[in-house]
């Protein structure tokens, strides 16, 4: 077996060294999917009064069940309709072996996915694995590139940076490059790790030293950004504040023998964040 | 008339044309057109999330009778009847969407079961559904009625482009493609001829000469599941050295009590379950020797023998079995039976026992070996097992088909989730949740049935006493009884 083959099969072995990443991918796909779905503008393309879906201005759980079911049912049907007509394009920054890129490319409302990374090795592995699923052939492309090198005028509906920011030297710069390339209404999804004791303990001490799940030196505490820092940074400049909003932030934690689960506290450990370009 | 729009292929016509073609690619291939396989196809095609998947169902036998039944059911009942639970009916109404296509006039709901001991008719358990706050315990239904409704549902959806049913077609081999040689491969080149080596999807070879390569292979292929063998999943079980004899019969009159009857004989339980009007179905589990007598015995003697077996002492029954073993057409056995039955007062017969059986439907008697088995897991990479392929159960509790339907629901839920997450549906990351949701409940059910079988199939005296005691106690302790009831009706 060639080097790339070995790398591809170890990256993609769901019971192998990347199992934690594969399991995390389940949760982040839930996060991405539900964020997009729940934030759809339901009445944006309505042609007439009749076309409008009723959106109650209060909590629907207060309504009697049949009425609630009716309202919720209508809203969900509209969301299905909107998504079935969508063909979003995606840029996956630091795609690695393509775990997230492949998942995004399989979603019916995604038109195309471009995965970029700096490492030739993982990209070759990603390309090899892509061949194992014919439905990816035309929807997914990989490219050896940094985000800065991509043309600025090419906009994306969705840009993802998962488990990447903690590996780059200037995370703010990568974030800016990502925000620049977002289409209006588009989404930037990121995941990274808060710089706190729990993160140090779970990812560096446990992950690298004790469990040996990831190679020692993979993580560097100084590169960790707290989720509040991203929010503050977005508010720092008037322009950024006007254009972008943080729609959701969720903490998540890995429980051995269970898998990843959301927590109620995004300030501790790993977190996901969804930033939307408003205008 | 049924629309024939869905692609049906029946053997030889297409054999020549497809001999050398490369494998067709599919998302899901279902092997087996029994209740589990048809239900899976109908549910996948009925779900907004999975209906776009390319699905092929392969059945070794013919589905002509099933198709015919949907539009033009025979007057008489067919011989395989099953008890379906309210939960299964709920699935069929809301998730599978097949209930609209069922012949409801051929379904009989019943409200309870009266079970009693073979050695002591006074130790009885009366399961009454009202005690657990439901209207019906379960409903009796012909196997083929369920299959026909599922097939009709699939056809009504009109998703011809993505649905193929091949009956009269056997799976002859399943191949796991070898790890492809990609050393000198141009990585940006698209796999032009599918199935030439890059896909690790299983290849299914059919008796028609065709082959199909599939993302996910689902074995709904019954107890001897070729898919389970391919996936090298171990199935552990118990063979009981017991056979079940089934038959469709006519009662002396329509029994308005609408209950099932079950008598625990030392040779195994005998159950009479109501069908609509004056029809009923029987399931008689017994020894290899007795079951052979039961299928051979003259059709005029058989009804009387079943009636008697619900009432008479076991010593009397053994004597009569002896006569019939010598000569299955020995009409003197009828006199022996009548004489013994005449000693039981009329009102006792009417109040404490099921209505007498007067005839048996021609060709409805059949004999099956009984076994209990459970696969260690239901999934492997690109493989899932559903229904009898995953577990077989003693028919005592009428659960086999119901368990298969609940498997289908759990599997489709896992696949829907996999679609929402953009996963490869053959990945164990998708399939794992099917196992964790379906396996434990099935295992508990198998355990209950095994214990009931062991408890009720012995004539070892102390155990009979304890058993009699147990049954009475059960009757008093309604919480325990309710638990047993729930396990039957859920
Ligand atoms: C006497 C008796 C009484 C029962 N009573 C009840 C009851 O009251 N309630 C209840 O819920 N259940 C009952 N059951 C159980 C119930 O009948 C089964 O659980 C149910 O039929 C299983 O359905 P299935 O689709 O999983 O398998 P099956 O019905 O066995 O279907 C498997 C299909 O796969 C096909 N197949 C197999 N191999 C191949 C191949 N190589 N190529 C192509 N096709 C293939 C076969 O032709 C078959 O059609 C009873 C069973 C018995 C024996
Ligand atoms: C932990 S992996 C995450 C892979 C993938 N995003 C996932 O979560 O499945 C981090 C990846 O980021 C890539 N990476 C690091 N710095 C980068 C940069 N500046 N630009 C693009 N990719 C980078 C690495 O090569 C590596 O493949």
Image (cartoon, coloured by chain):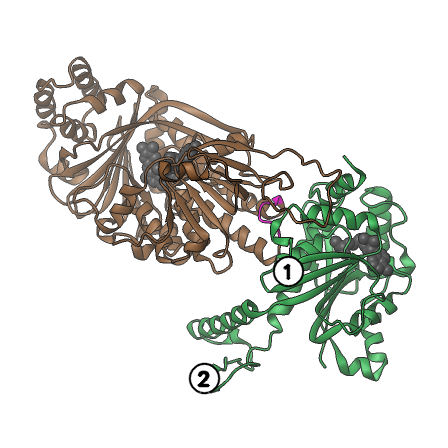
- The answer to whether residue B426 is magenta is yes
Q: Which mark is residue A50?
A: 2
Q: Quadrant of the N terminus of chain B?
A: bottom left
Nearest the eye: B448 or A30: A30
Q: Which chain is green?
A: A
B386 up-or-down from B190: above or below:
above
The residue that appears at 62% across and 42% down in the rendered structure is B199
Q: Where residue B42 sits: x, y (%)?
A: 41, 51
Q: Which residue is mark 1?
A: A30
What range is drawn magenta here? B423-428
B390 up-or-down from A225: above or below:
above
Magenta: main secondary structure equals loop
User: Dot 2 surroundings within 10 Å: few (below 14), some, or many (20 or more)?
Assistant: few
The residue that appears at 9% across and 25% down in the rendered structure is B338
Q: How many numbered markers are drawn?
A: 2
| Residue B14 at least partly seen | yes
Say which colour chain B has.
brown
Q: Is residue B414 left or right of residue B319?
A: right
Nearest the eye: B121 or B138: B138
């Amino acid at each position: 077996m060639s080097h790339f083959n070995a790398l591809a099969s170890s990256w993609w072995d769901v019971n192998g060294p990347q199992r934690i990443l594969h399991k995390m991918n389940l949760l982040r796909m839930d996060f991405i999917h539900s964020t997009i779905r729940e934030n759809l503008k339901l009445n944006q393309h309505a042609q007439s009064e009749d076309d409008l879906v009723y959106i109650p201005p209060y909590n629907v759980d207060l309504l009697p069940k049949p009425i609630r079911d009716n309202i919720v049912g209508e809203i969900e049907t509209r969301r299905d309709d909107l998504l079935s007509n969508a063909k979003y394009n995606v840029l996956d920054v630091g795609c690695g072996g393509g775990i997230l890129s492949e998942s995004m490319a399989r979603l019916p409302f995604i038109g195309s996915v471009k995965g970029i990374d700096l490492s030739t090795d993982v990209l070759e592995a990603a390309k090899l694995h892509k061949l194992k699923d014919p439905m990816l052939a035309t929807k997914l492309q990989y490219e050896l590139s940094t985000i800065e090198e991509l043309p600025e005028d090419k906009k994306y509906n969705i840009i993802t940076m998962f488990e990447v920011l903690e590996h780059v030297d200037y995370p703010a710069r990568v974030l800016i490059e990502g925000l620049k390339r977002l289409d209006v209404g588009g989404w930037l999804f990121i995941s990274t790790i808060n710089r706190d004791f729990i993160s140090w303990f779970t990812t560096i001490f446990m992950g690298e030293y004790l469990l040996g799940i990831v190679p020692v030196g993979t993580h560097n505490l100084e590169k960790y950004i707290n989720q509040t820092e991203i929010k503050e940074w977005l508010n720092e400049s008037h322009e950024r504040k006007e254009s972008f909003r943080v729609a959701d932030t969720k903490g998540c934690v890995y429980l051995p023998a269970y898998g990843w689960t959301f927590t109620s506290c995004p300030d501790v450990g790993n977190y996901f964040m969804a930033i939307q370009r408003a205008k | 008339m049924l629309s024939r729009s869905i692609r049906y292929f029946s053997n030889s016509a297409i054999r020549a044309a497809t001999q050398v073609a490369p494998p067709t690619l599919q998302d899901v291939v279902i092997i087996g057109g029994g209740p589990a396989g048809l239900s899976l196809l109908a549910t996948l095609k009925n779900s907004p999330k999975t209906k776009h998947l390319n699905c092929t169902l392969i059945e070794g036998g013919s589905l002509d009778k099933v198709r015919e039944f949907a539009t033009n059911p025979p007057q008489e009942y067919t011989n395989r009847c099953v008890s379906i639970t309210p939960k299964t009916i709920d699935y069929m109404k809301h998730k599978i969407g097949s209930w609209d296509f069922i012949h409801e006039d051929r379904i009989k709901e019943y409200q309870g079961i009266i079970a009693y001991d073979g050695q002591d008719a006074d130790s009885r358990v009366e399961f009454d559904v009202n005690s657990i706050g439901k209207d019906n315990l379960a409903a009796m239904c012909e196997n083929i009625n369920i299959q026909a409704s599922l097939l009709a549902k699939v056809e009504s959806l009109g998703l011809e482009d993505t649905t193929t049913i091949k009956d009269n077609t056997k799976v002859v081999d399943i191949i796991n493609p070898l790890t492809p040689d990609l050393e000198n491969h141009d990585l940006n080149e698209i796999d032009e001829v599918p199935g030439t080596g890059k896909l690790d999807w299983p290849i299914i070879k059919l008796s028609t000469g065709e082959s199909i390569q599939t993302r996910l292979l689902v074995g709904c292929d019954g107890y001897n599941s070729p898919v389970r063998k391919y996936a090298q999943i171990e199935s552990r079980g118990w063979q009981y050295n017991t056979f079940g004899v089934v038959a469709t019969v006519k009662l002396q009159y329509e029994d308005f009590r609408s209950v099932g009857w079950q008598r625990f004989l030392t040779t195994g339980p005998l159950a009479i379950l109501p069908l609509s009007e004056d029809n009923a179905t029987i399931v008689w589990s017994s020894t290899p020797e007795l079951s052979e007598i039961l299928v051979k015995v003259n059709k005029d003697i058989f009804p009387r023998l079943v009636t008697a077996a619900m009432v008479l002492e076991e010593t009397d029954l053994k004597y009569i079995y002896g006569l019939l073993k010598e000569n299955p057409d020995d009409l003197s056995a009828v006199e022996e039976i009548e004489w013994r039955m005449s000693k039981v007062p009329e009102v006792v017969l009417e109040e404490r026992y099921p209505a007498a059986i007067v005839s048996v439907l021609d060709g409805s008697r059949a004999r099956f070996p009984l076994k209990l088995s459970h696969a260690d897991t239901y999934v492997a990479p690109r493989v899932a097992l559903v229904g009898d392929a995953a577990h077989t159960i003693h028919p005592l509790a009428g659960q086999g088909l119901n368990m298969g339907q609940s498997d289908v629901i759990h599997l489709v839920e896992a696949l829907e989730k996999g679609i929402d997450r953009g996963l490869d549906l053959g990945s164990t990351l998708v399939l794992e949740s099917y196992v964790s949701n379906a396996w434990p409940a099935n295992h508990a059910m198998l355990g209950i049935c095994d214990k009931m079988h062991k408890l009720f199939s012995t004539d070892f005296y102390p155990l009979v006493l304890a058993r009699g005691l147990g049954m009475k106690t059960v009757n008093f302790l309604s919480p325990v009884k309710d638990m047993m009831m729930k396990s039957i009706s859920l």
